């Protein structure tokens, strides 16, 4: 695989294979997202499935940021890491999804998302497992007026929340800053390693990527939260958000 030009802070960049084009458009799939630039924060279970979805959509440029390394305990749900224990998550996820669609550019930033992060994107995906980072992302998205799709899971379910400029930010919807002050911030699936956890991450990541398409196409954007709960009769539910916020 060819190494691309460094863009900032020495990310690992994966571009197309020499002589191999990306997926061709067809009559059934003629939407072109090659001009879109997306940030994925978190390369865990949700990050794995979201990145695969973006590769399938043909999103032109994807930045993945995560400072964590792969451990044995990740392998029950972070499906692309089966042969990469001990390696960096961001770099490994970029490399693996780059194989899936060589026509896109995927950058790996092996660092934490913090208040100093900067960049311009068409969309941000929140795939982290702690409220503190999520609150920073909410502030960043509101300040830069960038749509943000946030997902969270446990072994039996999960939810998706969306911020689009002009509507209530995620902090107003989910009270992130208050939650971030709690002693136990982590929502990691490592604390509930049930076999079903892989499906909840698949389901929520699928919803997240679907919301990305709706944002890109400006069709029926979610206002509120959409959830999946395996213990509910209907499995799927939706909570509407009313009102605006000062960041909207």
Image: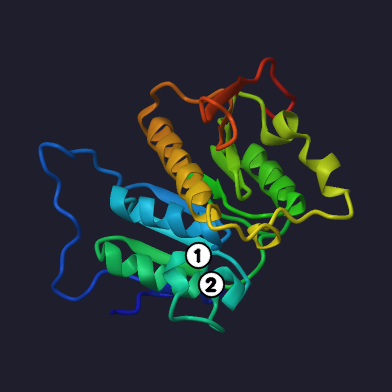
The CA span between labels 1 and 2 is 10 Å
Residue 105 visible in image = yes
Residue on which disc 2 sits: 89
User: Who's the residue at 38% across and 23% down the image?
Assistant: 219
- Compared to 219, does 66 lie above or below? below
User: Who's the residue at 61% across and 24% down the image?
Assistant: 167
State the residue lying farthest toward the left.
27
Residue 182: % across, % down: 88, 49
For residue 179, what is the image quadrant?
top right
Mark 1 vs 2: CB contact within 8 A: yes
Coloring applied to the structure = rainbow
Residue 154: % across, % down: 63, 49
Residue on which disc 1 sits: 78
User: Who's the residue at 69% across and 19% down the image?
Assistant: 244
Residue 94: % across, % down: 42, 68
Is disc 2 surrounded by few (<14), some (14 to 19) or many (20+) residues within 10 Å?
Answer: many
What's the mark number on residue 60? none
Quadrant (top left, top right, bottom left, bottom right) of the N terminus:
bottom left
> Which element carries disc 2, helix, strand or loop?
helix
In the image, 247 versus 48, the foreground residue is 48
Residue 40: % across, % down: 52, 55
- Is residue 244 shown left or right of residue 234? right
State the residue lying farthest toward the bottom.
86
> Which element carries disc 1, helix, strand or loop?
loop
- Compared to 221, does 37 lie above or below? below
In the image, 145 versus 183, the foreground residue is 183
For residue 65, what is the image quadrant?
bottom right
Residue 34 visible in image = no
């Amino acid at each position: 695989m060819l190494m691309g030009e460094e863009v900032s802070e020495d990310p690992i960049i994966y571009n197309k294979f020499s002589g191999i084009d990306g997926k061709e458009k067809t009559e059934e799939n003629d939407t072109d997202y090659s001009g879109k630039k997306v940030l994925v924060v978190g390369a865990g279970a949700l990050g794995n499935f979201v990145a695969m979805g973006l590769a399938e959509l043909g999103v032109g440029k994807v930045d993945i940021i995560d400072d964590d390394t792969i451990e044995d305990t990740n392998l029950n749900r972070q499906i692309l890491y089966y042969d990469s224990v001990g390696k960096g998550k961001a770099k490994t996820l970029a490399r693996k999804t780059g194989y899936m669609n060589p026509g896109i550019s995927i950058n790996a930033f092996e660092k934490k998302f913090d208040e100093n992060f900067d960049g311009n994107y068409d969309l941000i995906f929140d795939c982290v497992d702690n409220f503190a980072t999520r609150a920073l992302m909410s502030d960043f998205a509101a300040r830069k007026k960038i749509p943000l799709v946030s997902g969270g899971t446990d072994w039996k379910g999960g939810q998706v929340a969306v911020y689009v400029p002009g509507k209530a930010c995620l902090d107003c919807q989910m009270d992130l800053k208050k939650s971030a002050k709690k002693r136990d911030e982590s929502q990691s699936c490592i604390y509930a390693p049930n076999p079903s956890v892989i499906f909840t991450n698949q389901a929520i990541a699928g919803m997240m990527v679907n919301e990305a398409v709706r944002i890109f196409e400006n069709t029926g954007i979610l206002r509120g939260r959409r959830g999946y709960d395996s213990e509910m009769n209907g499995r799927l539910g939706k909570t509407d958000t009313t009102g605006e916020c000062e960041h909207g």
